[in-house]
Amino acid sequence: MEKLRVGIVFGGKSAEHEVSLQSAKNIVDAIDKSRFDVVLLALINKGNGTSAMPAIIC
């Protein structure tokens, strides 16, 4: 059976930034990787804007 791809978006400009990182890590740790292909997308604040980039959570 083909894995379902799941995107996890986290980070961003907020007082809850660190909570968002920890929540994403908790999801990655808990998700059934035999069923799901996890794609991480981090929202990074640079200057006046926010950009998104692929990420790895350790």
Image (cartoon, rainbow, N blue to C red):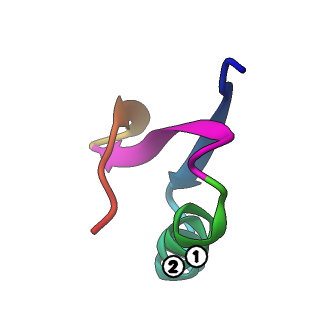
Residue 43: in magenta span = yes
* 52 shown above or below 34: above
Residue 36 horizontal/vertical position (percent): 65, 39
Q: Residue 54 carries which label?
A: none
Residue 46 horizontal/vertical position (percent): 27, 43
Q: Residues within 10 Å of mark 2 (few under 14, many from 20)?
A: some
> Which residue occupies the foreground of this view, 16 or 42?
42
The residue at the point 66 percent across, 56 percent down is 32
Residue 4 horizontal/vertical position (percent): 71, 26
Q: How many marks?
A: 2
Badge 2 amino acid: Gln
* 53 shown above or below 16: above
The residue at the point 53 percent across, 71 percent down is 29
Q: In which quarter of the image is residue 43?
A: top left
Q: Is residue 24 left or right of residue 46?
A: right
* 3 shown above or below 36: above
Element assignment for label 2: helix
Mark closer to the observer (2, 1):
1
Q: Residues within 10 Å of mark 1 (few under 14, many from 20)?
A: few
Element assignment for label 1: helix
| Residue bearing mark 2 | 22
The residue at the point 34 percent across, 33 percent down is 54
- Write down the region rendered in magenta: 33-46
User: Marks 1 and 2: in contact by CB < 8 Å?
Assistant: yes
| Residue bearing mark 1 | 26
Badge 1 amino acid: Asn
The N terminus appears in which quarter of the rendering? top right
The C terminus appears in which quarter of the rendering? bottom left
- Give the Cα distance between marks 2 and 1: 6 Å
